[in-house]
Image: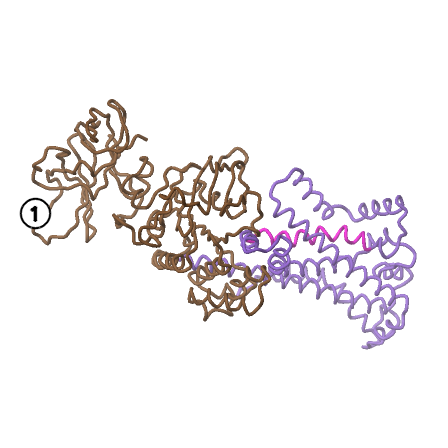
Chain colours: A brown, B purple
Amino acid sequence: MTVATASQSTPTLTPRAGPRTAAPQSGFAPWNDPKKPPIVRFEGITKRFDDFVAVKNITLDIYEREFFALLGPSGCGKSTLLRMLGGFEKPTEGKIIVAGQDITDMPPYDRPVNMMFQSYALFPHMTVEGNIGFGLRQEGMPKDKIAERVDEAMGMLELRQFAKRKPNQLSGGQQQRVALARAIAKKPRIVLLDEPLGALDKKLRQQAQFELMRIQETTGTTFIIVTHDQEEAMTVASRIAVMDKGDLVQVATPGDIYENPKTRYISGFIGDVNLFEGKVSAVADGCVEIESTEGSKLKTRSAEPVSVGQQVWLALRPEKIRISHDQPSSTVNAIPGKVEDIGYLGSISHYHVRTAGGQRITALRANAAHAVERSISWEDSVWLDWPVDAGVVLTR
Amino acid sequence: MKTRFSWFNLTSITFGFAFLYIPILLLVIYSFNESKLVTVWGGFSTKWYGSLLQNQALMDAAWVTIRVAVVSATIATALGTLAAITLVRMGRFPGRTLFSGMIFAPLVMPDVIIGLSLLLMFVAIGFDRGFWTITLAHITFTMCYAAVVVQARLQDFDKSVEEAAMDLGATPVNTFFQITLPIIAPSVISAWLLAFTLSLDDLVLASFATGPGATTLPMKIYSQVRLGVTPEINAISTILIGIVTVGVLTAAYITKRQTDKAERERRRAFGATG
């Protein structure tokens, strides 16, 4: 028996399909323009700590005005990659290029990037104003100019009323805003955010995510965020790089990552997924037929080139599966089963269905119609079906 | 909440404190003795404090002592702070264990041995013994105390605060003076006070390292006592006790306030995560 559902996210996760509203501007996709130079380029970056390899030969381009997310579980190397860009770690191999300039050996204080730390790292002996103005004072900017810039940053983050307070007189949310204000005060070209919202509670975190997006859009700065929270990455980012054990697994827009995950790891890491293990039994005009181990023939469109006999997995999102009492008219991708569990979540319900072959499949149904359809209940015999373009064929 | 003392506790505390402080108390009381005879009470008077100011030899010794204490405490604190930073910040480097062991060895090394080895060295290199040799000796043995005090503070210091400063454009030197030093200042001050008081009442090292013309107060007192205790000695000792007490209490107070503050901040941080 295979485990059908790899669930790591909350059930309310509903990714948006189609063009993303969170992108800085509609049609914003510099990564598709081969002529556009990247603002940050990691070139074959490897980082070893003694014999532990934290980052393995990563090559990655990030473009101006992007809100780029490095996503992965703790220990996957995402923070190390960010810290190398900040200048706090030296890559063992490879080059880091920012705006055409090789900064691999440049000390942190000369780099055109500013970082917001997970612990906020506010200076405890300085006021909010003093903290925000610290970077500007290092530049030797005239006092009145500093005051102006500090005031601008405080205004942007609604911190003016706290100007004279010390960090320990602020709440967690206020400290987080001071840390962000300090990171943007110098108007750097790139702002690095290391788990910036990790210490906030869920509600505050959602507010802060939208605040981050607003600041990123108004300042037009490139933001690179490190997070282990896939919902956070989906919400804020224009592109996401998923990392695992020091490797870059996939770099794509949130929609792409959700709809076309490249590996089983990613399909399970972002959102819920049903996985059918099987062998390719036929390939014809863009469609693949898979004979699954649980005993059904599944037909799906595939962009991935596969050959007959190859071991593959079909990844299928729960909301793409239709569940009903009646046998569907088409015989393609229709599987009978028995309802084992129902999770009622108000707006939607989760149905866990055991197929004849013994596989457990999760299907979602929106509770839109009010008692019109015959409701599905425990132990009901049901049919599951989905169109040929609903699933993704994975080879890894 | 009030803690009630049991009879056993009360008795042991009384005896303990009596054992520790009655000799000192006697000395303080007799420093206000009218009589010239040290062991006979002749009424209250502060005249010995007055006559102290007339005793040129004693005043000279006091002046030497204070100069030695200030100079050696300052240099020892600076060196101790640097050593502590190296130990805490540098992470692992070859010889780290040896380095930390060598810094802390004087804490347990008998004073007589340090004194003797310093004396041998000064003689060997032909260093004229006097004010500077005493100062050097005191730097050697107070530096490790300063390093311990500062190291304790640095260990719970968030390293990302320094990284943030550098990230915002501060060079390592600017980061040290604008961020690290102000944050660890209380422990640097208490390290200085500790080094100062240690230097003030040291007799053994000073005796080994001294030369003509440089007599510290403890040495002076010791040599005078051999000729007989005078009320003046009681008076100057009382002053010395006062200075040492104030120094130690201030250092303890600063450290306490600092740990309380760190504790409060930690609790706040946890409160914020909710």
Q: Is residue B53 magenta?
A: no
Q: Nearer the viewer, residue A370 or B170?
A: B170
Mark 1 crowdedness (10 Å alpha carbons): few <14, some 14-19, many ≥20: few
Amino acid type, residue under disc 1 in the picture:
Arg
Q: Position of residue A93 (x, y in %)?
A: 53, 36
Residue at mark 1: chain: A
Q: Position of residue A98 (x, y in %)?
A: 50, 46
Q: Is residue A131 above or below residue B127?
A: below
Res B26 → quadrant: bottom right
Q: Position of residue A345 (x, y in %)?
A: 21, 51
Q: Which residue is mark 1?
A: A374
Q: Is residue B219 toward the left or the right of residue A137 in the image?
A: right
The magenta-colored residue range is B135-158
Q: Is residue B1 toward the left or the right of residue A35 in the image?
A: right
Q: Is residue B199 above or below residue A260?
A: below
Q: Considering the image in quadrants, where does the C terminus of chain B appear?
A: bottom left
Q: Is residue B141 magenta?
A: yes
Residue pictured at 81% horizontal, 62% vertical: B67
For label 1, the SS is: loop
Res A267 → quadrant: top left
Q: Residue furthest top?
A: A309
Q: Is residue B5 toward the left or the right of residue A316 in the image?
A: right
Q: Position of residue B237 (x, y in %)?
A: 80, 65
Q: Is residue A354 above or below residue B242?
A: above
What's the magenta bit mostly, secondary-structure-wise?
helix
Q: Nearer the viewer, residue A393 or A60?
A: A60
